[in-house]
């Protein structure tokens, strides 16, 4: 079952990359647990995110991204408070 343009759920339940076939998640409940992760300052998101977050909040703000471990296609992006302990989660039902 295709999840989106990048991810598919295989017959055995793992989540794979539709571009290269690499395993990205061990199950539909943890679809990105094998993805490569990156965390940088939110201003690294590009010209659309240029304001200094300190003007709006006391918390540090981070750009977090998840990539396919095989072909490095970008799978997930979020701009969130950097002091949150884990990535926001999503799963398939
Ligand atoms: Zn891939």
Image (cartoon, rainbow, N blue to C red):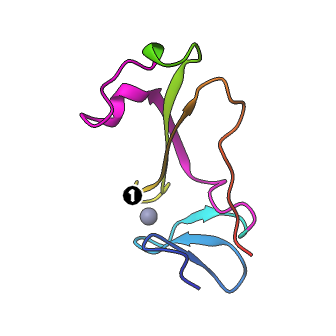
Q: Quadrant of the N terminus?
A: bottom right
Across and down, in percent, residue 78 comes to 51, 43
Q: Quadrant of the C terminus?
A: bottom right
Please state which of residues 14 and 81 is positioned toward the viewer in this rendering.
81
Which quarter of the picture shows residue 30?
Answer: bottom right
Compared across the picture, whether 19 is left or right of 81 comes to left
Which quarter of the picture shows residue 92?
Answer: bottom right
Which quarter of the picture shows residue 29?
Answer: bottom right
Residue shown at 58% from the left, 65% from the top? 23
Residue shown at 63% from the left, 54% from the top? 34
Residue shown at 40% from the left, 54% from the top? 72
Please tell me whether residue 49 belongs to the stretch shown in magenta.
yes
Across and down, in percent, residue 18 comes to 45, 75
Q: Residue furthest left?
A: 47
Q: Is mark 1 within 8 Å of ligand 1?
A: yes
Q: What span is colored magenta in the figure? A: 29-53
Q: Residue furthest front?
A: 56
Please state which of residues 42 and 56 is positioned toward the viewer in this rendering.
56
Callout 1 crowding tier (Cα within 10 Å): few <14, some 14–19, many ≥20: some
Tag 1 residue = 73
Q: Quadrant of ligand 1?
A: bottom left
Please tell me whether residue 48 belongs to the stretch shown in magenta.
yes
Compared across the picture, whether 48 is left or right of 9 comes to left
Callout 1: SS: loop
Compared across the picture, whether 71 is left or right of 29 comes to left
């Amino acid at each position: 079952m295709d999840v989106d343009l990048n991810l598919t759920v295989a017959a055995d339940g793992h989540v794979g990359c539709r571009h290269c076939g690499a395993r990205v998640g061990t199950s539909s409940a943890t679809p990105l647990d094998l993805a490569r992760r990156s965390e940088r300052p939110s201003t690294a998101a590009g010209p659309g995110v240029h304001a200094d977050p300190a003007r709006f909040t006391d918390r540090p703000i981070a750009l977090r991204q998840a990539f396919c471990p095989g072909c490095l296609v970008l799978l997930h992006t979020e701009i969130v408070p950097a002091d949150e302990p884990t990535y926001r989660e999503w799963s398939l039902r």
